[in-house]
């Protein structure tokens, strides 16, 4: 009975220490959302690792995950990503064969390491076979080319382009963030609304902080 009590006490102490260190070291989920969004939007390369799944009727690799680098550009306020969809690519074929056009895109810190942040976005791809249906297509093109000037050779609607291509939009449904080592950083799911709202939240926080500063002066 005494031993049990001791064990319980120790477990409680350990638990408290754990909670204490977690609370002290972690960024909040809201801060994690801002960090995750920065990682994607301010990436120096705007290249992520895309993952898709081979169709179940594929002759040699049915249902296998497939991942390889992919260009993206963050051209929407809500964190949706602009892609150029090349029907010739393995990813595009996998996406089209998925009834919901599912894909995942992950982005890591400039120097990928266990202690550095990375984020994985799970979502779906909307392909615009008719670029007249792309809202603000001129702004989208300009935004994409700013990140990827070399993509000018395979832009949609270019009769002389190297490949047939279409504008596409990746909408995240879910966000998984690894801030770094678990004891020090947030690791886990980030609610979509926090991720999508991150720049506006950041701006309004600046606004509030600015106002307080001025009021204090
Ligand atoms: C994100 O914003 C774009 C417009 O910039 C819109 O077309 C798209 O549907 C939005 N995505 C989500 C998931 O709300």
Image (tube, rainbow, N blue to C red):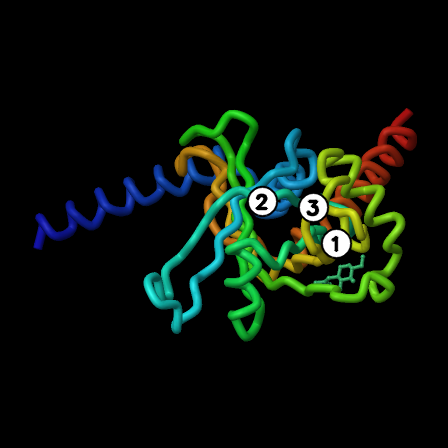
Count all numbered tags in the image, as a single digit.
Answer: 3
**Which SS class for mark 3?**
loop
Residue linked to disc 2: 70
Q: Quarter of the image containing the C terminus? A: top right
Mark toward the viewer: 1 or 2: 2
Q: Position of residue 201 (x, y in %)?
A: 76, 47
Q: Tell me the quadrant of ligand 1.
A: bottom right
* Distance of label 1 from label 2 (alpha carbons): 20 Å
Q: Secondary structure at mark 2?
A: strand
Who comes first in sequence, dot 3 or dot 1? 1
Quarter of the figure with residue 64:
bottom left
**Residue contact between numbered discs 3 and 1, judged by CB atoms under 8 Å:** no
Q: Residue 125 at x, y = what percent?
A: 63, 62
Q: Residues within 10 Å of mark 1 (few under 14, many from 20)?
A: some
Q: Where does label 1 land, which residue?
A: 78
Pick the residue in front: 184 or 189.
189
User: Which circle's residue, 3 or 2, is located before the other in the chain?
Assistant: 2
Which picture quadrant has residue 93? bottom right
Which residue is found at the position 57% from the left and 72% from the top? 100
Could you tell me how far apart the alpha carbons at marks 3 and 1 are, in whole angstroms? 31 Å
Is residue 96 shown above or below 161?
below
**Residue sitting at 89 percent across and 50 percent down?**
138
**Is 130 on the left or on the right of 189, as rendered?**
right
Mark 3, ligand 1, within 8 Å: the answer is no
Q: Earlier in the sequence, mark 1 or mark 2?
A: 2
Q: Residue at x 32, y 63 (%)?
A: 60
Q: Which residue is mark 3?
A: 162
Measuring from the top left, give residue 92's x and y in whole percent. Answer: 57, 59
| Residue 79 as seen in the image, left or right of residue 19 | right
Locate residue 184: give its quadrant.
top left
């Amino acid at each position: 009975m005494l031993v049990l009590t001791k064990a319980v006490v120790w477990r409680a102490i350990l638990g408290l220490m754990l909670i204490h260190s977690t609370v002290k070291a972690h960024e909040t989920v809201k801060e994690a959302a801002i960090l995750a969004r920065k990682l994607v939007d301010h990436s120096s390369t705007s290249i992520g690792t895309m993952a898709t799944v081979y169709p179940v009727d594929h002759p040699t690799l049915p249902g296998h995950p497939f991942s390889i680098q992919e260009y993206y550009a963050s051209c929407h306020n809500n964190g949706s990503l602009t892609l150029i969809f090349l029907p010739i690519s393995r990813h595009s074929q996998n996406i089209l064969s998925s009834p919901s056009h599912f894909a995942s895109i992950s982005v890591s810190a400039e120097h990928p390491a266990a202690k550095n942040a990375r984020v994985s976005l799970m979502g779906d791809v909307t392909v615009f076979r008719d670029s007249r249906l792309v809202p603000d297509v001129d702004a989208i093109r300009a935004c994409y080319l700013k990140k990827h000037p070399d993509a000018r050779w395979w832009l949609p609607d270019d009769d002389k382009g190297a490949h047939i291509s279409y504008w596409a939009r990746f909408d995240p449904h879910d966000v998984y963030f690894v801030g770094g080592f678990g004891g020090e950083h947030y690791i886990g799911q980030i609610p979509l609304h926090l991720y999508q709202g991150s720049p506006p939240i950041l701006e309004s926080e600046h606004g509030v902080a600015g106002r307080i500063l001025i009021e204090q002066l």
